[in-house]
Image: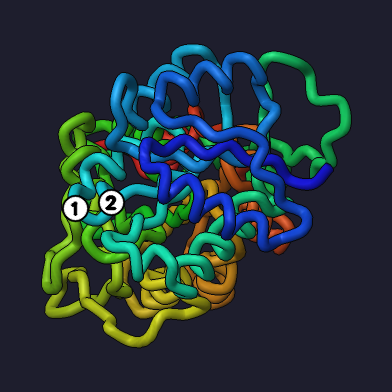
Amino acid sequence: MGRKFLIIDDSALMRRVISDIIKQISDYEVLDLAYNGLEGFDRLVAKPGYYDLVILDINMPRMNGLEVLENLRKNNMNETVVVVSTVVKEGAAETIRALELGAVDFLTKPENFYEVKSDMFSTKLLSLIEVVTGNDIKKKNLTKPIETVKTTPKAPAVRPEVRETVKAVNRDRAMGDCIVALACSTGGPKSLQSVINKLPKNLAAPVVLVQHMPKGFTASLAKRLDMISEVTVTEAAEGDVLENGHVYIAPGGMHIRVEYVNGKHVIRYDNSPPVGGLKPYANIMYESLIDTNYKDYVCVVLTGMGADGTKGITSLKASGKKTYVISQDEETCVVYGMPRSIYEAGQSDEVQPLEKIAESITKNVGVM
């Protein structure tokens, strides 16, 4: 049997259309349909870890999609869920919340019959399914052991050659001494909650952050993270002067660079085309740091598909900048793609589980 799907949607039309699209691929099989969130959740409880992918709507009777995700989390059920809903267009806040609760990606549901039946929607859905059910997805079923899992060799938390230099930093830093540059993709919004909200308010560095998201969603992500964090979190704006203890998230649909101008480091927008379909693109951010004037550079790579970040960080190190790289470990990644790439390129100085990333950043940056 190939990949198994569960569709949870209160629209009979959408259940049928999504089923027909999925069935175009011989290796895909829609095993179950649910017409509301409660029925869908009951099916997941009855068959934990059985489905390769769950297609989930948000606005449904009895139990909505966010409540389904909340209940999955409460019961330690790590199902692979993609949200397909009109809400992802009309209300980015609900989408961010869905991603925080464990959904791995999302797609806007068409608003009329003609769009629903269009080749564009079919192509987007199949492409998304291919990405999130690929080999990089770490499907974990906590209700029973996984006996056959291929993994990369376990990396040491800190590489031996730098172990002696990594220790708690309790020193004052001058403004402009250090910068943290962070990149993440699939699984990022949820993971960022475990990193950004653990950073101290007096962190002795600004943080520039690329999360792969489309236009219109990063503002909501920034607002949500700002509400739960000690550091200030905003969507990066053209001309922002970087300040310690402040996180700047690249806007969806826009690359960002960091420039050194008149003794200050500022955000610059870069409206060049997407790279590999990605905009913002982390490599552009990292490569821009080569011409900045910081003394120390702490680069962080979290969960995500692909290899964005590796080229830019490699170039930054090769430029002679004092660069320290922290990558997330395989076990705690939703998708072990971007961290795998940076580690296999030999650029990771430290490999840590998600819950240790903020501590590692603070140790290397220090506080004011």
Amino acid type, label 1 = Glu
Image position of 144 (left or right of 353)? right
Residue 33 locus on image (x, y percent)? 54, 34
Quarter of the rendering occupied by the N terminus: top right
Image position of 47 (left or right of 62)? right
Looking at this view, is 255 or 202 the one in front? 255
Residue 86's disc is: 2
Q: Is residue 275 above or below residue 293?
A: below
Q: Is residue 362 visible?
A: no
Q: Is residue 141 above or below residue 100?
A: above
Q: Is residue 236 visible?
A: yes
Disc 1: which residue: 90
Image position of 279 (left or right of 165)? left
SS label for mark 1: helix
- Label 1 Cα neighbours within 10 Å, binned few <14 / some 14-19 / many ≥20: few
Query: What residue is at 25 percent from the left and 40 percent from the top?
Result: 94
Residue 149's disc is: none
Gap in Å between the C-alphas at discs 2 and 1? Answer: 6 Å
Residue 43 locus on image (x, y percent)? 57, 21
Query: What residue is at 38 percent from the left and 72 percent from the top?
Result: 279
SS label for mark 2: loop
Q: In the figure, residue 229 lies in which quadrant?
A: top left
Residue 179 locus on image (x, y percent)? 33, 56
User: Cβ–Cβ below 8 Å for labels 2 and 1?
Assistant: yes
Query: What residue is at 48 percent from the left and 51 percent from the top?
Result: 300
Amino acid type, label 2 = Thr
Image position of 278 (left or right of 32)? left
